[in-house]
Image (spheres, rainbow, N blue to C red):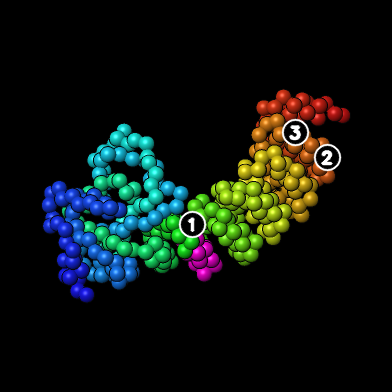
């Protein structure tokens, strides 16, 4: 199929100052040369043709999204795909949520330059460029195409946008694609971004992937990042906390154990106090024992002071006891001041 036929097929409008088209699950677009096509040859093939058009072109399609997508803000004004928006933050209103969204790619110079995810009720302004809308893009095809692009040497901002776009698809293939992106066959930055969205967007199945990586991945720097990701898991949150506690006790890397301590205190609060106190007593690494004391200091009062006083009174390591005393000195709990006063009065 030639580029000319590709651009001429199903042309709805020629370029006009205020051209507007709109059908079910198709955006309203103004200031554009709009073409509507069927993606019967597959999304990758359509994008490859777009790369050879010779001038910048926006290519878009609709995807089903899980959990309801929202950009976080909304406005009655058009989305400016080219250039800066003419409207201020004061024009924004409360955002709505939708069961589908638009993926928009700017293709120019033989490559994809930019990705946008837009709400389906937003009017788009293409700035006079060609705009190709693809009907019939299968969610699985969309996921695999975007994931393949993310694995390439893309600019960081584009790559991060690609991984996010994969994560919001309402299809199990999205979880599989993110799991593959999080595997050790990819660069660390790609892996970290994929793991973040597995935890944040993919529910129980995403957690299973994160848990497996936390237990078996050999890269300590990556496992350290997973400790934060586990705090984002909402389904099942209790299992995520259990995994954090396991990492704090059992991970082979002291740095990972330290980070797990901090995040388990943030996520678990009072229920992990005993685990942190045990680590302050028994972890083989002094820095990890000291970090456990810091994690205890991050608990809400009065629990933080209760635990720190116990560590300062009973821990067998003088370095750890000194650390507990230091953090008690930062506390506003009257019991902390009372304990420190008695400590100073001892002969």
Q: How would you rate the neighbour count of disc 1 (Cα within 10 Å): few for under 14, some for 14-19, many for 20 or more?
A: many
Quadrant location of the N terminus in the rendered image: bottom left
Quadrant location of the C terminus in the rendered image: top right
SS at mark 2 in the image: helix
SS at mark 3 in the image: helix
Check contact, mark 3 vs mark 1: CB within 8 A. no
Q: Which numbered disc, 3 or 1, marks the residue that appears first in the sequence?
A: 1
Mark 2 = which residue?
314
Residue 94 visible here: yes
Q: Residue at x 52, y 69 (%)?
A: 185
Magenta part of the protein: which range?
174-189
Q: In front: 76, or 147?
A: 76
Instruction: Give the side of residue 201 with respect to residue 158, left or right.
Output: right
Mark 1 = which residue?
193
Mark 3 = which residue?
306
Residue 317 is situated, as x and y percent measured from the top left of the image, at 80, 45
């Amino acid at each position: 199929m030639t580029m000319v036929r590709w651009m001429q097929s199903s042309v709805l409008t020629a370029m006009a100052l205020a051209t507007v088209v709109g059908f079910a699950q198709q955006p309203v677009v103004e200031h554009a040369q709009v073409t509507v096509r069927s993606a019967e040859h597959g999304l990758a093939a359509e994008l490859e043709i777009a790369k050879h058009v010779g001038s910048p072109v926006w290519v878009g399609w609709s995807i089903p999204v899980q959990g309801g997508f929202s950009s976080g803000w909304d406005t009655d004004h058009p989305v400016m795909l080219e250039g800066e928006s003419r409207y201020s933050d004061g024009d924004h209103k409360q955002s709505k949520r939708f069961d589908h969204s638009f993926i928009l790619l700017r293709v120019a110079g033989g490559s994809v330059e930019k990705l946008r995810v837009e709400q389906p009720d937003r009017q788009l302004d293409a700035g006079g460029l060609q705009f190709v809308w693809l009907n019939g893009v299968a969610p699985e095809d969309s996921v695999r195409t975007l994931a393949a692009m993310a694995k390439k040497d893309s600019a960081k901002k584009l790559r991060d946008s690609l991984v996010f776009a994969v994560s919001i698809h309402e299809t199990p293939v999205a979880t599989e694609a993110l799991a593959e992106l999080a595997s050790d066959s990819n660069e660390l930055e790609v892996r970290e971004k994929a793991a973040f969205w597995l935890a944040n967007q993919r529910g129980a199945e995403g957690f299973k992937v994160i848990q497996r990586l936390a237990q078996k991945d050999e890269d300590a720097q990556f496992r350290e990042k997973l400790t934060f990701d586990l705090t984002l898991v909402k389904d099942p949150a209790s299992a995520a906390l259990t995994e954090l506690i396991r990492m704090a006790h059992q991970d082979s890397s002291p740095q990972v154990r330290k980070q797990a301590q901090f995040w388990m205190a943030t996520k678990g609060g009072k229920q992990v106090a005993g685990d942190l106190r045990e680590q302050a007593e028994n972890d083989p690494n002094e820095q990890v024992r000291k970090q456990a004391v810091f994690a205890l200091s991050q608990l809400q009062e009065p629990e933080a002071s209760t635990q720190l006083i116990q560590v300062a009174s009973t821990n067998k390591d003088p370095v750890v006891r000194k650390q507990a005393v230091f953090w008690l000195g930062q506390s506003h709990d009257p019991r902390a001041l009372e304990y420190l006063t008695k400590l100073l009065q001892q002969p």
